[in-house]
Amino acid sequence: MFTPIDDLPDGAIGFLASGRISRSDRDTVLEPRIETAIERSGHVKLLYIVGSDFAGYEPNSLLDDAVFGTRHFRDFERIAFIAEDGPYRRAAGAMDGLMPASLKMFPVHEIEAAKAWLSAA
C-alpha cells in the first residue's frame, strides 16, 4: 500500500510503500497526488520510502506503474529514494541517468536529509 507522507517541503509529495502495492493503491493514492502536484507547480518533487515490509507489486501493477511513469516522464524534477541496501535500492539506482529527474538515494535514517535535498531546488 502507499501511505502519503505529510510534513514535506513546499512542492514535495511523499509516500511510504509497504506490503504489496496494488492497482487500487496506484489509482486512489499515488496518481491523484502526483496529478495534483503537476497541476499546482508543473512538476513533482517526490519522496519515496521503501518500508521494511515492502513486498513488491501485485501482478500487472508494475506494468501499470511503468505506463503511468512513461506518461509523466518529464514531470518529475527530483526524486529522493529511501531504502536499505537491497534489490529495490539497486533497481532505483539503475534508473539514475535514464530519466530527466534528479534521483538521489538515501539510507532510511536520513529522511530529514532527503527532505532538505528536495527543498534545495
Image (cartoon, rainbow, N blue to C red):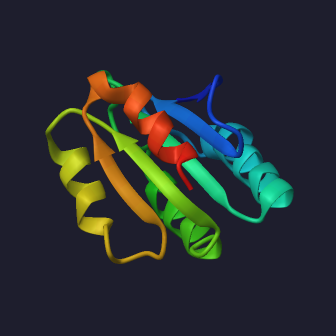
Side of 91 relative to 33 (left or right):
left
The spot of residue 74 in percent (x, y) is 60, 75
The spot of residue 5 in percent (x, y) is 60, 26
- Name the outermost residue toward the front: 120
The spot of residue 20 in percent (x, y) is 42, 33
The spot of residue 59 in percent (x, y) is 43, 50
Side of 94 relative to 101 (left or right):
left
Side of 2 relative to 98 (left or right):
right
User: Closest to the observer: 55 or 76?
Assistant: 76
Picture quadrant where residue 64 is located: bottom right
- Name the outermost residue toward the right: 39
In this rendering, does residue 3 appear at all? yes
Picture quadrant where residue 18 is located: top left
User: Closest to the observer: 32 or 9?
Assistant: 9
Picture quadrant where residue 57 is located: top left
Q: Residue at x 14, y 41 (%)?
A: 86
Count the labels in the image.
0
Q: Residue at x 53, y 49 (%)?
A: 120
Q: Residue at x 73, y 39 (%)?
A: 28
Q: Residue at x 41, y 34 (%)?
A: 49
User: If the image is split into quadrants, where does the C terminus sit?
Assistant: bottom right
User: Closest to the observer: 21 or 76?
Assistant: 76
- Does residue 121 lie above or below 58 as drawn? below
In this rendering, does residue 50 appear at all? no
- Does residue 45 lie above or below 51 as drawn? below
